[in-house]
Amino acid sequence: MCVSASLATRRTVAAVLAAGALIGAAAVPAVAHDDDRRDHRGAYASIVIGDVQHGSRGRDNRALNREWVEVKNTGRHSVNLHGFTLTDRDGNRYRFAGLRLEGHSRVKVHTGQGRDTHRDVYQDRRHQIWDERDTATLRDDRGRVVDTETWGRHGHRDPR
């Protein structure tokens, strides 16, 4: 009786392991497929730095507002940018507050002063931020890099 109980136990364990392997094998392709579609930036893959206008001449508010970095949503769904930050190479930082960027839209982050709208926001600075050679880094509300754009002599972009 001991032999048949041991054989029954082994058969039960084998059946459970086989069922687990089948379930695991069925789940793996679905997970792998999701990973193939996912960008390295995760949930914010549609949020990118667009055009950059740097180094406007003059220190008045009009000149500072001609200096901007564009943040674009290339996806269909809106994204809440609350808590996102945009920084330059020197560590100057702008923090987004309460802005939802609709799908297929953009917002310009101006250096100077003005009234924030859904298309234009202002850093309220009194001096130039973006240099001829600089880097803009966009981070999400947890500090993870969403996108980076470099321009100038060693960068890949010269927007002028």
Image: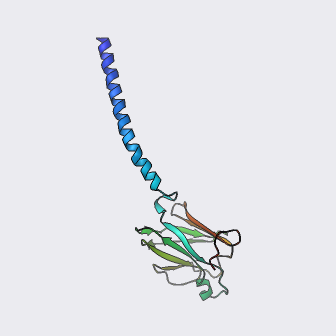
Relative to 108, residue 89 above or below: above
Q: Is residue 83 visible?
A: no
Quadrant that contains the N terminus? top left
Res 8 → quadrant = top left
Disc count in the image?
0
Q: Is residue 12 left or right of residue 66?
A: left
Relative to 68, residue 17 above or below: above
Residue 50 picture location, percent across and down: 54, 73
Res 77 → quadrant = bottom left
Q: Looking at this view, is 140 or 134 the one in front? A: 134
Res 94 → quadrant = bottom right
Q: Is residue 11 left or right of residue 112?
A: left
- What colour scheme was applied to this rendering of the protein? rainbow
Outermost residue to the right: 153
Residue drawn at point x = 41 percent, y = 43 percent: 28
Residue drawn at point x = 47 percent, y = 65 percent: 46
Residue 134 picture location, percent across and down: 66, 71
Q: Is residue 83 left or right of residue 76?
A: right
Residue drawn at point x = 54 percent, y = 75 percent: 70
Q: Looking at this view, is 100 or 83 the one in front? A: 100
Q: Is residue 75 visible?
A: yes
Residue 59 picture location, percent across and down: 66, 86
Quadrant that contains the C terminus? bottom right
Q: Is residue 65 left or right of residue 10?
A: right
